[in-house]
Image: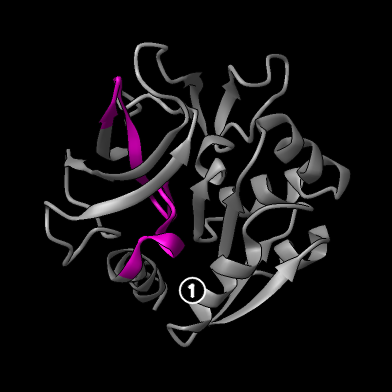
């Protein structure tokens, strides 16, 4: 199956493409809404500032197409800022609306810990997860972020702790996302991407 990777004008697209192609997947970049309308599976990677991310989607008329794909049940995988953009809003950009797949708001990590949260950390599993299938519970993943979605969001299947408990993996229906970077998390991250690909068949 060909994966459609959303190109909002910046970010870590080449490394995400290489990671999926290394697993035998075909990829294409979507820069127009008609590409998302025809997509059978979508990857929404993101790095940087929340406002630049949502503005990039809006300027390419991709926001409505992403919401339509979600409502149609197209499988979507968000990565890092792509996870945060699935929520209603973020403290990083007051007044900017997210995609609104989930009603909660993304918050800044607390000031009593080092921010951004950069480096390797472990997850705390909260319920069964198709993305984490076959991955040891003590596995480490690579994070790089200053904002995070609340672990109390009902779609959270695994949390991570850095000052606060935040959503590290979310899954709801055909929608999934990870706060860490699987493309930078070695074989463990590759297994997450492989699990996503296998869930499409």
Q: Nearer the viewer, residue 94 or 103?
A: 94
At x 59%, y 54%, the residue is 44
Tag 1: Cα neighbours inside 10 Å, few (<14), some, or many (≥20)?
A: many
The residue positioned farthest toward the front in the image shown: 114
The residue positioned farthest toward the right in the image shown: 59
Q: Nearer the viewer, residue 146 or 73?
A: 146
Q: Is residue 170 found inside the magenta-colored segment of the image?
A: yes
| Applied colour scheme | one colour
Residue 40, visible in the rendered structure? no
Q: Is residue 32 left or right of residue 118?
A: right
What is the secondary structure assignment of the residue under circle 1?
helix
Q: Nearer the viewer, residue 156 or 70?
A: 156
- Residue 86 to residue 69: above or below: above
Q: Which residue is mark 1?
A: 19
Residue 91 placed where, x, y %?
58, 16
Q: Is residue 53 left or right of residue 85?
A: right
- Residue 103 to residue 34: above or below: above
Residue 50 placed where, x, y %?
66, 32
Q: Nearer the viewer, residue 182 or 3?
A: 182
| Residue 93, quarter of picture | top right
- Residue 80 to residue 99: above or below: below
Residue 35 placed where, x, y %?
76, 67
The residue positioned farthest toward the left in the image shown: 137
The residue positioned farthest toward the bottom in the image shown: 24
Q: Which residues are magenta?
A: 161-186
């Amino acid at each position: 199956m060909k994966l459609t990777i959303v190109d909002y004008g910046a970010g870590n697209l080449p490394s995400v493409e290489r990671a999926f192609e290394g697993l035998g997947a075909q990829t294409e970049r979507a820069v127009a809404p008609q590409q998302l309308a025809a997509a059978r599976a979508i990857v929404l990677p993101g790095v940087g500032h929340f406002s630049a991310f949502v503005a990039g989607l809006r300027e390419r008329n991709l926001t409505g197409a992403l919401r339509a794909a979600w409502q149609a049940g197209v499988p979507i995988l968000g990565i890092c800022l792509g996870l945060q953009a699935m929520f209603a809003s973020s403290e990083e950009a007051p007044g900017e609306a997210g995609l609104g797949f989930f009603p909660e708001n993304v918050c800044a990590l607390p000031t009593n810990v080092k921010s951004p949260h950069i480096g390797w950390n472990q997850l705390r599993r909260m319920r069964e997860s198709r993305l984490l299938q076959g991955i040891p519970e003590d596995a480490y993943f690579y994070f790089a972020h200053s904002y995070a979605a609340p672990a109390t969001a009902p779609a959270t299947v695994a949390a991570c702790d850095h000052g606060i408990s935040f959503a590290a993996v979310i899954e709801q229906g055909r929608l999934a996302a990870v706060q860490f970077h699987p493309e930078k998390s070695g074989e463990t991250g590759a297994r997450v991407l492989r699990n996503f690909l296998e869930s499409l068949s």
